[in-house]
Structures are given as C-alpha cells and as structure tokens.
Amino acid sequence: MKRIAVLASGEGTNLQAILEAADRGEISGEVALVASDREKAPALERARRHGVRALYLDPRACGSRGEYDRALAAVLQESHIELVALAGFMRLLSPHLVQAFPMRIMNIHPSLLPSFRGMIGAQQALDYGVKVTGCTVHFVDEGLDTGPIILQEAVPVLQGDNVETLQARIHALEHRLYPRAIELFCLDKLRVEGRRCFIELG
Ligand code: GRF
C-alpha cells in the first residue's frame, strides 16, 4: 500500500473523493496525511472526520516559500510519503520540494492543459468561448501547470452555462479522474519519458 499525502487549501471535495475511493478499495494506497496552509480549510476537517492525520502548516511561521517547503518536505519524508496529491493547494511549490519528490507529486487542474493555466479554468473557458473544456491530472514539475499529463478528459460547454454550472460539471469529472490517476500510480503503471506519461497495460 502506497502512503499518500494530500495537500489542500480549500473545500477538499477532491480529497473527499480520494478518501471515498480508497474506502471502496479503488485506490491501493492509504491517505496517511492531509496538510494545509489554511488553518480553517474544510479539507482539514474532512480529514479529521475520516480519521486521517490533519496538519496545518502556518506560512507565517516560515520566513519564505523555500523555508515553508523545506518544512513541508521534512514532514512528508518523516511520514514516509510516496505520493503527494495536490488538491486545490494554492501555493506554487519551490524547486526544493519538487526535487525531493520527482514525478511523485500530482496535481488536478480544471481545464484541458495547456489551455487555461492558473486558477479559474471555468471562467477562462467561458471568457474564451470554447465549446469543450475539461480537467487534467498531471505530474508537478518546477513550472506552473506544466508537468507531464497523466489523464485528461473533456466536458462540453453548454449554451446556458455560467461559471457555477460549468465548474460543477468539471468538478464532478475531477472526482472520478483523480482517484483513477492515483490508482495508476499506486499500481506502478505510470512511466514518464520526457514530456510524455505512458500507462503500462495489463
Ligand atoms: C479543483 O477545481 C482543482 O481543479 C483545483 O482546485 C480545486 C479544488 O477543489 N486545483 P476542492 O477543494 O477539491 O473542492
């Protein structure tokens, strides 16, 4: 069983989907730690309710982003974490943290990358007028939403959509896609060559 940490700053609905998938046996791993940079993040409460260790790491207690990430990396290493899943973690990771977990940090992003990087994927899709958007699970490298893509799926943008309805459709997809990507990692089925991530069959 792989040991997984989820980092989340907000609501934690993706965390919830991961916890529930693990409960159903759809993830061959254990969420051993949930950490947040926001003390009041509902994600921490979800972790506690699930009996998972919930850790608030206060950014103000660390002088810089680098220092914060060193503290975070130390906690993850002490907890023998093998996969770090970012689920709405609103911080750009420093090179130190990324290098400490090479191709072992994943992120879920609410658009079909490389379109609409940044935090408001649904709004950007509506503003641009695309007919199809979606979500992407990717490995994290040192750029912003630039790492190798693991899974990607599309949703339609409907005529009557507003940010809330489109976001809800993307969110529902995220909740299915993220646990699947995590399970592929747990089964050692992901192989990265350059920018491409291959899924081993069989
Ligand atoms: C998701 O939309 C995800 O794509 C983005 O942050 C959001 C987190 O949502 N990275 P939640 O906290 O899991 O509900």
Image (spheres, rainbow, N blue to C red):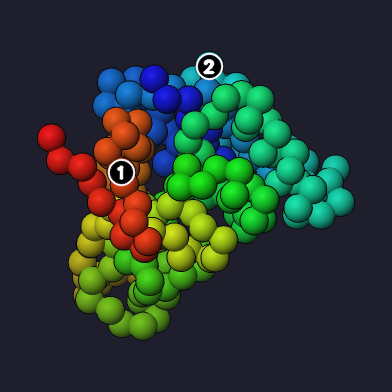
Q: Which residue is at a point 46% across and 47% down the rendered structure image?
A: 103
Q: Is residue 65 visible?
A: yes
Which residue lies most toward the front here? 193
**SS state under label 1:** strand
Residue beneath the point at 32% across and 66% down: 112
Residue at the far top in the pictured view: 51
Q: Residues within 10 Å of mark 2 (few under 14, many from 20)?
A: few
Residue 57 as seen in the image, left or right of residue 178: right
Q: In the picture, which quadrant includes the C terminus?
A: top left
- Is residue 124 or residue 106 the one in the foreground? 106
- What residue is rendered at 76% in x and 53% in y? 66
User: Residue 2: which quarter of the image?
Assistant: top left
Q: Position of residue 116 (x, y in %)?
A: 42, 73
Task: Kindly identify which residue carries mark 2.
Answer: 51
Query: Residue 179 falls in which quadrant of the image?
Result: top left
Front-lying residue, 200 or 53 = 200
Q: Which mark is residue 190?
A: 1
Q: Are marks 2 and 1 in contact (CB under 8 Å)?
A: no
Q: Which residue is rendered at x = 48% and y = 63% of the image?
A: 145
In the depicted structure, whether residue 46 falls above or below residue 177: above
Mark 2, mark 1: which one is toward the viewer? 1
Secondary structure of the residue carrying numbered label 2: loop
Please name the amino acid that badge 2 sits on. Gly
* Quadrant in the rendering for residue 95: bottom right
From the viewer's perspective, tell me whether residue 24 is left or right of residue 96: left
